[in-house]
Amino acid sequence: MLTLRSKTLDTVQSRKAITVTPPSVRVSEYFNTNVFHDSAMMEFLSKEAYKAVSNAIKNGEKIDRSMADQVAAGMKNWAISKGVSHYTHWFQPLTGATAEKHDSFFEPTEDGRAIEKFAGGALVQQEPDASSFPNGGIRNTFEARGYTAWDPSSPAFIMEGFNAKTLCIPTIFVSYTGEALDYKAPLLKALHAVEKAVVNVCSNFFDKNVTKAYASLGIEQEYFLIDEAMCVARPDLMLTGRTLLGLSPEKGQQLEDHYFGSIHPRVYDFMVDFETECYKLGIPLKTRHNEVAPSQYECAPNFEEVNLAIDHNQLLMDVMEKVALRHKFKVLLHEKPFAGINGSGKHNNWSLITNTGTNLLAPTHNPSENLQFLTFFVNVIKAVHDHADLMRGSIASAGNEHRLGANEAPPAIVSIFIGSQMTEVLESLLNNSTSKNVSKAGSINVKKIPEILLDNTDRNRTSPFAFTGNKFEFRAVGSSANSANAMIVLNTIMADQLNKFSADTQALIKKGKKKEDAILEVLKGYYKASKKILFEGNGYSDEWVKEAAKRGLSNIKNAPEALNAYISKSSKEVFVRNEIFNEVELNARYEIMQELYVKKIDIEAKLLAQLATSHVIPAGIAYQRNLAENVKAMKDAGLSKSDTEVQVNLIKELAGHIKIISTNVAKLLEELDKAHHLSSTHKSAMAFSGKIKPLFEPIRNSSDALEFMVDDELWKLPKYREMLFVK
Ligand code: ADP
Ligand code: MG
């Protein structure tokens, strides 16, 4: 009998190479060609329309309606010159994916003909139905309508299908009453808040020339690539993005032969094709390589302003999946597609940069600039220390729950790694300034830093939040996440902290302290107060879990509980104070995230029950039947009880596992029903995490035991070694 599994293997092995012809010209010649970027704007917009858009991008100025008409016309002409027929507002609802609804430029005219039209109104605003997107109950209180509004700071781009092209306009998505229903609206607010705070601190204390600043972000993206046919044959990969069952292969990543290894030709072709599409969209991809686990890869672009970097990452994930189709691959962005080997993350490299070109998190050779560096550095530590639970909440999801706290990924404990040299600098700051002579201490510290050239090899890959020489790397973000959650939190708490710093320092100056002394005294206090969050050791170790508990640091392992940080008193205060979210929005967001968790685990639970019942148990029974027939034949041939002992024991062992699976599936279905009838979404989510997920384990363990025992011919689901190693 030809099983789906054996057919799948045949399909994969007989794949012919898909020929990709990358453009024969240099990347610089097609980079940004599908983006309405500066030079396209110059060509297609009138002088005043160009100025209006530039001002909107650079200074956040509003574009009035008459100007919007002009911009829309120019954008349409540019798009049509590239063969585009449709346009869409492109936005990021809280589903995690991007959303688009295409409208044609074409408009019939009264004389029976048609023209291509795109008015300013359609560019600036559209009205999708908010009730079809996650809204956390906002629609019950208010109207169902929502609208999308153009974000001129992220340029419009052209998305290419196989035979058609669409103009995509990045937008925010809000309810009719103004509550954010997406990632971008609060992100833009957080970025505005942090810019304002940074400019204040720089211009008041360090450099009058700083009038603008931005937060920078470089996102490293890990992913798995699996043959499409394998995914079709694995319903769990198809529907949940991860394997709910599967015996770990004998060879996983233990030989350490995949990381940075030579790239498989099929994968290499995919990467080149994918990069070409990204370059046309202005996504500045720089690196590609094999990751640690078999079939795992990574790509990383150059860093950009946070809003743009996130749009580009969202776009990149979408493009990646589409290009993979051409190559008969499926991209797995799930945080933990396979048990027993590494999961995937999305490292967020973050810094703050001024209009004078200074990276505020890079130490320099100049003593006064280094006081500025130290100020921002210590304030990051203080901000993360004070809002560690919120940082943890910002990365909480059903998928990331498999990584955080499991022993191959950043722990669920939020800590900061700064390296031995920065530890030394901060310690000497603390010790010197405990002496009476603050200004001497200041001069020692300030002068001392330039002598310390930061050693970039001082890395710690087990830290969730690590200083890497000129930026912080938030390493605990999940691979499928929209980085906005993490960036909204980080930039908000940083804005808040910098405002506190300004106030604290000004207060000391008012009391007669010299500026430098005041700054150092405040920093010293911050360092002392937040030191306990610094950890230089192995974040994956059990000792750290104990040590962190002693220090009073949280270690929240499940997502529903971690999400509680969003509605704690201190989080609500910091979000409201900085005008990022109001209470209605926070409660809605909290509800949506809990709901999403429930939905994800619910799908997994139902599918696991399905697979166990219709794939695993029948395979066990079929093998049992074969064995029983064999025993009978042996007995008929006159063999004794001791001769059939092995077979009989196997039958018993199979029966044992089948029983464990079926009783736990029954329990699972029962608990599912209960969990859906609890009085709040959070209670349901807690039940899904505490009662339902634990039942996955005995089912999986027994299923994997059956996979180990059962005749290979009878096992219908592709095995780990096949999914991971056959290309
Ligand atoms: P790694 O050793 O962790 O792979 P890389 O030096 O390759 O680190 O950089 C990883 C990412 O950090 C890249 O996307 C890079 O553009 C980004 N990055 C570098 N400098 C900054 C910065 N100042 N702000 C934000 N991201 C940065
Ligand atoms: Mg990195």
Image (tube, helix red, strand yellow):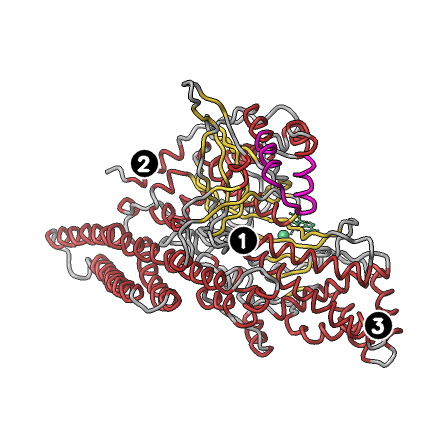
Residue 259 circle label = none
- Dot 1, how many residues are within 10 Å of its Cα: few (below 14), some (14-19), or many (20+)? many
Type of amino acid at the residue the image marks with label 1: Gly
Between 507 and 114, the one nearer to me in the picture? 114
Residue bounds of the magenta highlight: 50-73
- For label 2, the SS is helix
Figure check: 428 above or below 203: below
Magenta stretch: helix, strand or loop mostly: helix
Between 227 and 145, the one nearer to me in the picture? 145
Q: CA distance from mark 2 to mark 1?
A: 33 Å
Type of amino acid at the residue the image marks with label 3: Asp
Q: CA distance from mark 3 to mark 2?
A: 74 Å
- What x and y, as percent, mark residue 723? 41, 44
Asked if ligand 2 lies within 8 A of label 1, the reply is no
Q: Is-magenta flag for residue 684?
A: no
* Marks 1 and 3, the one that precedes in the sequence: 1
Q: CA distance from mark 1 to mark 3?
A: 41 Å
Residue named by callout 2? 7
- What x and y, as percent, mark residue 248? 41, 54
Q: Is-magenta flag for residue 71?
A: yes
Q: Is residue 253 visible?
A: no
- For label 3, the SS is helix
Residue named by callout 1? 345
- What x and y, as percent, mark residue 500? 70, 69
Q: Is residue 329 visible?
A: yes
Residue named by callout 3? 517
The answer to whether 246 appears left or right of 197 in the picture is: left
Nearer mark to the viewer, of 1 and 3: 3
Q: Can you tell which quarter of the image residue 664 is in?
A: bottom left
Identify which residue is drawn at 86% across, 61% down: 367
- For label 1, the SS is loop
Nearer mark to the viewer, of 2 and 1: 1
